[in-house]
Amino acid sequence: MTQTRDQVQEDEAGHGVVRKFMFVNRKAPYGTIYALEGLEVVLISAAFDQDVSLAFLDDGVYQLVKGQQTKGLEVKNFSPTYRALEGYDVEKLFVERESLEARGIAEAELLVPVQVVSAQEMAQLMEQQDVIVGF
């Protein structure tokens, strides 16, 4: 269940309840709006002091690859924005090991520090979330 800012539940003392949000990125960074829109939603959620984590699976792992060149696509390269996540206290980035391996990408080729986890570990992380949003 996704809630708006005005609908956030309050605990008995009247404080807003922090929810665990996981944003799951499965799409390549360019060619659709999913990756950029997802990143913007993550930044907005973090600004509202929610517990935010990101998961990168399938072609979503390409969003974190260093050295992206977008000039030929005539779109802005937004990948440096991932480095700003730490400033928003978004430090839980998970990448599925099998997705990296299937695409021949090494962890050292990624822009930011991540936790590489197995598909089974990723499923367990998802089970711990209050809200999962897919892009």
Image: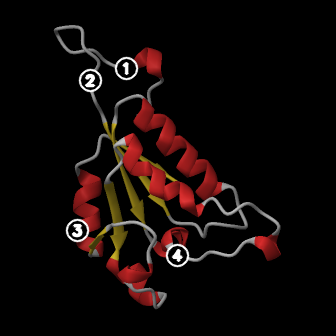
Q: Are marks 1 and 2 in contact (CB under 8 Å)?
A: yes
Foreground mark, 1 or 4, reads 4
Image coordinates of residue 119 in percent, x first then y, are 30, 73
Q: Are marks 2 and 3 in contact (CB under 8 Å)?
A: no
Q: Nearer the viewer, residue 77 or 17?
A: 77
Q: Which mark is residue 45?
A: none
Q: Which residue is mark 2?
A: 17
User: Mark 2 vs mark 3: which is more N-terminal?
Assistant: 2
Q: Which residue is mark 4?
A: 66
Q: CA distance from mark 3 to mark 4?
A: 25 Å
User: Mark 1 vs mark 4: which is more N-terminal?
Assistant: 1
Q: Which residue is mark 1?
A: 8
Which quarter shows the N terminus? top left
Label 1 sits on what residue type?
A: Val
Q: Nearer the viewer, residue 62 or 108?
A: 108
Q: Nearer the viewer, residue 42 or 132?
A: 42
User: Mark 3 vs mark 4: which is more N-terminal?
Assistant: 4
User: Mark 4 vs mark 2: which is more N-terminal?
Assistant: 2
User: Mark 3 vs mark 1: which is more N-terminal?
Assistant: 1
Q: CA distance from mark 1 to mark 2?
A: 7 Å
Q: Residue at x 34, y 43 (%)?
A: 89
User: Mark 1 vs mark 2: which is more N-terminal?
Assistant: 1
Q: Residue at x 44, y 27 (%)?
A: 3
Q: Are marks 4 and 2 in contact (CB under 8 Å)?
A: no
Circle 3 packing at 10 Å, graded few (<14), some (14-19), many (20+), is some
- The secondary structure type at the circle numbered 3 is helix
Q: CA distance from mark 3 to mark 1?
A: 29 Å
Image coordinates of residue 40 in percent, x first then y, are 57, 44
89 vs 128, left or right, is: right
- The secondary structure type at the circle numbered 2 is loop
Label 3 sits on what residue type?
A: Glu
